[in-house]
Image: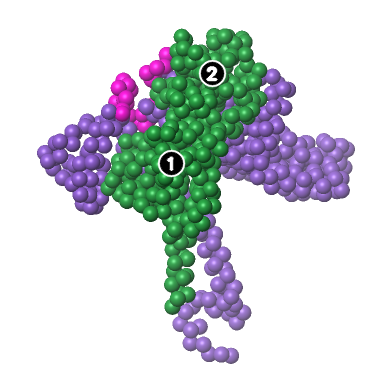
């Protein structure tokens, strides 16, 4: 009888492989956050061995969709949840999902190392990425055509940049879409007329330009002080979302830990920016 | 002799009626093989039905993705009849029955919030998934002239499939122009001209190409070929249709080669011998006698190569740059149908307009390969008929 029961449990587990087992916290979502979420999980599991945390990527929308269908406990998202997604959550579990800010991310704009352009205004960035500005000499560079590199439209970084820098306008159609920030940086590194954008955590290869809010303000390079202090203009919070009903026990403890000084130390190690003190949990 | 009552009752069952040599095991295996082959047909059919079913609402224009919807304030909750409310919130009757009043009010509040988030764009009232906007250019707000635009994640989603069709076509044509001459040349050489020793090495080597996973080919294209080709030809954009086409060609070569080589080898030896006896060189015999005799098979090889090229995903996803532009220039980036589906399916909300659009282009791809195979088959039969002197 007991073996039968075991077999039944095993089959059930196989059938719904994504469903959480007892004592396992399942996390899914943003590709930007996947390295961070894994590091969090490793560090946390190191200190509380009876908790198992499973982290997968796929994109912010994928994580939120999985939260809507109840497949996971925690959804990572690099953008605020959309009204339609809240609506779907309410349709399945009757409540708004609970939101926590867990880190700060600054998006850098990368150009090739040999490009003489040192700083761009938000308006110039808008022009370049929507295709109004086509040549580097229009923004004080050499006379060559600008090649725009962008991300796939399934990425949270793409949506953030579109909302924040393009003010909701479309990317220029000739923008090449890359499969990840690393691939994009590699392309900009090899292309002397290239420009792209991506999380600060990936820096290297290409060079980040300073960004000016408008023509009169100073150029600001992305750094912890400028991003967390909100003087650098392109920054965002990183979020986690969960069903308020499951925000208790192990999961609540884990989220508290993420938002505490210990969890925020991991954020810094990975290369993102920690939450300002007033947003942290006291432990 | 055993007197089995069953043999009288069921004639032909288990093959017993085939006489004293009846072999039930053979009968069973025969039926099993039949079932297996039947299941292949059924699977293809089911896949097509599945893909087409998801795309049907767009084909028949029953999807509407206008951004603007008339908003009913949550305060008016009591004024609505249950039917109106259910329709307004887009719930199925069973879902609706399970919801408490609080949940329903919350949903109505969310609709209001969504309406506030929505844009005041002049195109907000456009149903962008109707055929007019899928196939014809349109001047969207913020654009200077009517254009073909594929921008599915946007305030106003734009789903024009023409840039994707052109992208797929461009990459496929380059792949075929590159691979077919090479593969046919290799097939003629291996089947007609090469010494047996050389043949033993060259043939498996080319066929080994088909064992390379396409993701490896794509990576090779992305990292190495893109840089080498750019320094050779000096074009502007590093990743483009040309690079992807050449990398794709490497995947197509073994397909075309294997089938063409088979067709050439199966031409009767006596044809070559007759040609040689009449004083032609080996090269003339191969080119003027064997190749024309094998032309239906060679043609089939090219058609299959086309199918492989148009359906290949990973290579084009990695090496083509994936910009959805309307450009005939081979050195410009291109976004193919397959790469679009692979890159965007993960984020598309199941059942939403974007999701259905992706299934629509998937169904389109299915139709394209089906039509090309069908056309290829018809032409092949004509060629065969002509060769055998039936026409």
Q: Nearer the viewer, residue B124 or A220?
A: A220
The dot on residue A259 is 1
- Colour for chain A in the figure: green
Tell me which residue sits at (42%, 13%) in the image: B144
Tell me which residue sits at (50%, 83%) in the image: B7
Q: Quadrant of residue A61?
A: top left
Mark-to-mark CA distance, 2 and 1: 30 Å
Magenta region: which residues? B117-145
Q: Quadrant of residue B176?
A: top right
Q: Secondary structure at mark 1?
A: loop
Give the mark nearest the N terminus, 2 or 1: 2
- In the image: residue B244, left or right of residue B374: right
Residue B295 image position (x, y, % from top left): 69, 40
Q: Which residue is mark 2?
A: A210
Residue at far left of view: B79
User: What's the magenta bit mostly, secondary-structure-wise?
Assistant: loop
Tell me which residue sits at (37%, 27%) in the image: B155
Q: Which chain is purple?
A: B
Residue A280 seen by the camera: yes
Residue contact between numbered discs 2 and 1, judged by CB atoms under 8 Å: no
Image quadrant occupied by the N terminus of chain A: bottom left
Residue A280 image position (x, y, % from top left): 41, 38
Q: How is the image coloured?
A: by chain
Image quadrant occupied by the C terminus of chain A: top left
Chain letter, disc 2 residue: A
Check if mark 2 and mark 1 are on a common chain: yes
Residue density around tag 2, few if under 14, some if 14–19, many if 20 or more, within 10 Å: some
Badge nearest the viewer, 2 or 1: 1
Chain letter, disc 1 residue: A
Residue A235 image position (x, y, % from top left): 46, 27
Tell me which residue sits at (46%, 9%) in the image: A216
């Amino acid at each position: 009888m007991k073996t039968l029961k075991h077999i039944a449990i095993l089959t059930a587990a196989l059938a719904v492989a994504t469903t959480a087992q007892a004592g396992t916290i399942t996390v899914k979502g943003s590709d930007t956050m996947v390295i961070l979420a894994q590091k969090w999980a490793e560090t946390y599991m190191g200190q509380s061995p009876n908790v198992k945390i499973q982290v997968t990527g796929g994109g912010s929308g994928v994580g939120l969709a999985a939260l809507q269908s109840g497949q996971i406990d925690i959804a990572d998202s690099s953008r605020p949840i959309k009204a339609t997604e809240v609506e779907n959550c309410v349709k399945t579990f009757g409540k708004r999902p609970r939101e926590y800010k867990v880190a700060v991310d600054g998006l850098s704009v990368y150009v090739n190392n040999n490009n003489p352009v040192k700083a761009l205004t938000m308006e110039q960035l808008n022009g370049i990425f929507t295709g109004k500005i086509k040549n580097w000499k229009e923004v004080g560079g050499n006379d060559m055509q600008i090649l725009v590199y962008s991300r796939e439209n399934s990425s949270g970084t793409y949506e953030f940049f579109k909302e924040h820098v393009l003010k909701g306008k479309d990317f220029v159609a000739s923008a090449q879409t890359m499969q990840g920030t690393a691939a994009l940086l590699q392309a900009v590194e090899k292309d002397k007329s290239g420009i792209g954008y991506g999380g600060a955590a990936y820096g290297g290869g290409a060079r980040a330009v300073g960004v000016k809010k408008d023509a009169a303000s100073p150029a600001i390079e992305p750094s912890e002080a400028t991003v967390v202090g909100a003087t650098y203009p392109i920054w965002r919070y990183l979020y986690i979302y969960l069903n308020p009903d499951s925000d208790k026990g192990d999961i609540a403890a884990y989220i508290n830990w993420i938002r505490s000084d210990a969890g925020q130390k991991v954020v810094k190690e990975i290369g993102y920016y920690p939450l300002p003190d007033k947003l942290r949990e006291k432990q | 002799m055993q007197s089995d009552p069953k043999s009288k009752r069921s004639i032909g069952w288990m093959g017993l009626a085939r006489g004293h040599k009846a072999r039930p095991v053979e009968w069973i295996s025969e039926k099993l093989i039949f079932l297996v082959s039947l299941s292949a047909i059924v699977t293809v059919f089911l896949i097509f039905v599945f893909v087409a079913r998801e795309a049907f609402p767009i084909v028949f224009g029953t999807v509407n993705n206008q951004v603007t919807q008339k908003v009913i304030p949550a305060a008016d909750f009591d004024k609505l009849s249950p039917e109106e409310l259910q329709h307004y919130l887009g719930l199925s009757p069973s879902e609706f029955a399970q919801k408490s009043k609080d949940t329903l009010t919350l949903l109505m509040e969310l609709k209001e919030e969504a309406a506030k988030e929505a844009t005041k764009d002049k195109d907000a009232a456009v149903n962008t998934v109707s055929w007019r906007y899928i196939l014809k250019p349109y001047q969207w707000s913020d654009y200077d002239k009517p254009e073909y635009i594929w921008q599915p994640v946007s305030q106003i989603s734009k789903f024009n499939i023409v840039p994707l069709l052109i992208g797929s076509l461009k990459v496929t044509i380059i792949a075929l122009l590159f691979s077919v001459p090479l593969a046919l040349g290799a097939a003629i050489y291996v089947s007609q001209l090469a010494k047996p020793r050389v043949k033993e090495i060259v043939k498996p080597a080319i066929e080994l190409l088909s064992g390379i996973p396409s993701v490896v080919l794509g990576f090779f294209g992305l990292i190495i070929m893109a840089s080498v080709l750019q320094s050779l030809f000096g074009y502007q954009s590093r990743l483009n249709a040309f690079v992807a086409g050449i990398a794709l060609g490497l995947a197509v070569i073994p397909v075309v080669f294997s089938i063409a080589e088979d067709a050439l080898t199966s031409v009767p030896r006596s044809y070559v011998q007759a040609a040689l006896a009449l004083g032609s060189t080996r090269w003339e015999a191969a080119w003027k006698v064997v190749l024309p005799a094998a032309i239906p098979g060679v043609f089939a090889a090219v058609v299959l190569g086309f199918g492989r090229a148009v359906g290949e995903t990973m290579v084009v996803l990695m090496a083509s740059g994936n910009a959805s532009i309307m450009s005939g220039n081979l050195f410009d980036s291109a976004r193919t149908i397959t790469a679009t589906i692979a890159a965007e399916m993960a984020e598309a909300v199941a059942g939403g307009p974007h999701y259905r659009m992706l299934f629509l282009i998937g169904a389109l791809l299915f139709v394209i390969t089906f039509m090309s195979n069908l056309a290829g088959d018809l032409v092949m039969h004509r060629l065969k008929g002509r060769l055998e002197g039936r026409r």
